Amino acid sequence: MANMTSLEHFDYRGKTVLLRVDINSPIDSKTKLIVNDNRIQKSIPTIQRLLDGGAKLAMIAHQGDTLDYQNLIPLEEHAEKLSTYLNTPITYIDDVAGPAAQDRVRELEAGDAILLGNLRYLSEEISTFENAVKLKPEEMLETYLVRGLAPLIDYYVNDAFAAAHRNAPSMVAFQELKPAAAGELLFDEVAALDKVMHAPEHPSVFVLGGAKISDAFGMMEQVLASGTADRILTCGITGEVMLLASGRRLGEVKERFLKDRELDIFVEHSKNYLRDYGDKISMPSDLAYGVDGRRREIAVENLPAEQMFMDIGARTIADYQAAIRGARTLFVNGPAGVYEEPEFEQGTRSIWEAIAAAEGYSVIGGGDTVTAAAKFVDLDAIDYVCTAGGAMVRYLSGKKLPLIEAMEKAHARDVRTGNE
């Protein structure tokens, strides 16, 4: 477990607290309304605890980014949902750290809360800035966000594990200046992933699918080499790439699809994994495609075929369900197929139903993963639903996250200076 200061170590009565949450939510492309508020709900316990403790609470969060500009919208609806779940008004101002935002923070009374504007309005908070400029936390103290808000606050609290992989001022800079604590969700997320990564009950089964296969490949070698995973069930694009690596031809249609998206670069990695850990990696034994709006399936022995494969087939489903039933630890990232289309939802639905019914400890994570699970099962049937995608993958890959490093550094300083 990361060595971070917990909430109870500080007295927040009458103090101004800056809370970084991650309430970045899926947005309907047409209505621009939130379609899944799982992250908002998960943020409630820490917010409630700070308000109950008499804090003057200013919250910062992001929505969208340069890579998903269509989701870059104001946080007004987020504030409305927070108000509903907390049963207390959460004020919203469409200003991040400028004079208007600063004035509203100064005006807070004990037990009041305000949500400031979308952090991604600031260039220093977008991913392209992070990737191009590469500032260290101590070099971020002159950024607009920190200069605007740091003088107004007494404490900094972070509860945004889903953004823990981001080296941005809102995530790692305030810890340089202020006593800092980790929120309840941040501790819960790390604890759940530590249980999967460091202390899994065996057999431990990972289900890796979806279209964003860099996530799967980011963790696969680590969990195999460390013995964390006893078996990996591959599906979606990940499963198809594994089939190619095993020597199977899919067919020109699907292979061109993968090549055009530069997903074929993972084939060589897959060959290495199959060479070193082949007995632990399961690949689809059949695939599904559509003809005239109807589902068809083909055994991999009969490949190649000039079809666009969209799901795993019945044989694969049965095999994977059996593995899931026998698992003591389950981790899932990515759906089995294009579950948004009714004729191709069978694989994803069947796997989620098996996981929901399984006796083993189950953890899922990633935006599309959670959305898919919520479509087919009650999320309460999953032992832990992680809010993170990229941060979760990097953590399970054994990589140190910027947020965790910043929180541990602040903890060590606060212990040394007696602020803990």
Image: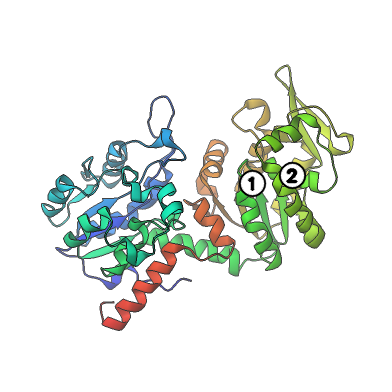
**Residue picked out by circle 1:** 213
Question: Which label sits on residue 79?
Answer: none
Residue at 43% in and 66% down: 404
- The amino acid at mark 2 is Val
**Residue picked out by circle 2:** 241
User: Residue 294's image quarter?
Assistant: top right
Residue 225 is situated, as x and y percent measured from the top left of the image, at 70, 66
Camera sees residue 332: yes
- Relative vertical location of residue 327 with respect to residue 241 in this rendering, above or below: below
Residue 191 is situated, as x and y percent measured from the top left of the image, at 49, 65
Residue at 34% in and 72% down: 410
Q: Tell me the distance, in whole angstroms, between the alpha carbons under discs 1 and 2.
A: 9 Å
Residue 367 is situated, as x and y percent measured from the top left of the image, at 51, 44
> Circle 1 — which element?
helix
Location of the C terminus (image quadrant): bottom left
Mark 1 neighbour class, 10 Å CA radius: few under 14, some 14 to 19, many 20 or more: some
- The amino acid at mark 1 is Ile
- Relative vertical location of residue 8 with respect to residue 275 in this rendering, above or below: below
Which residue lies most toward the top here? 292
Please report whichever mark, 1 or 2, sits nearer to the chain's N-terminal start.
Answer: 1
Check if mark 1's residue and mark 2's residue have beta carbons within 8 Å: yes
User: Residue 279's image quarter?
Assistant: bottom right
Please give left or right for residue 388 compared with residue 155 in the image. right
Residue 232 is situated, as x and y percent measured from the top left of the image, at 71, 54
- Relative vertical location of residue 144 with respect to residue 83 in this rendering, above or below: below
Please give left or right for residue 327 compared with residue 177 in the image. right
Residue at 85% in and 42% down: 248
Which residue lies most toward the front here? 133
> Circle 2 — which element?
helix
**Could you say which is closer to the camera, residue 148 or residue 398?**
148
Mark 2 neighbour class, 10 Å CA radius: few under 14, some 14 to 19, many 20 or more: many
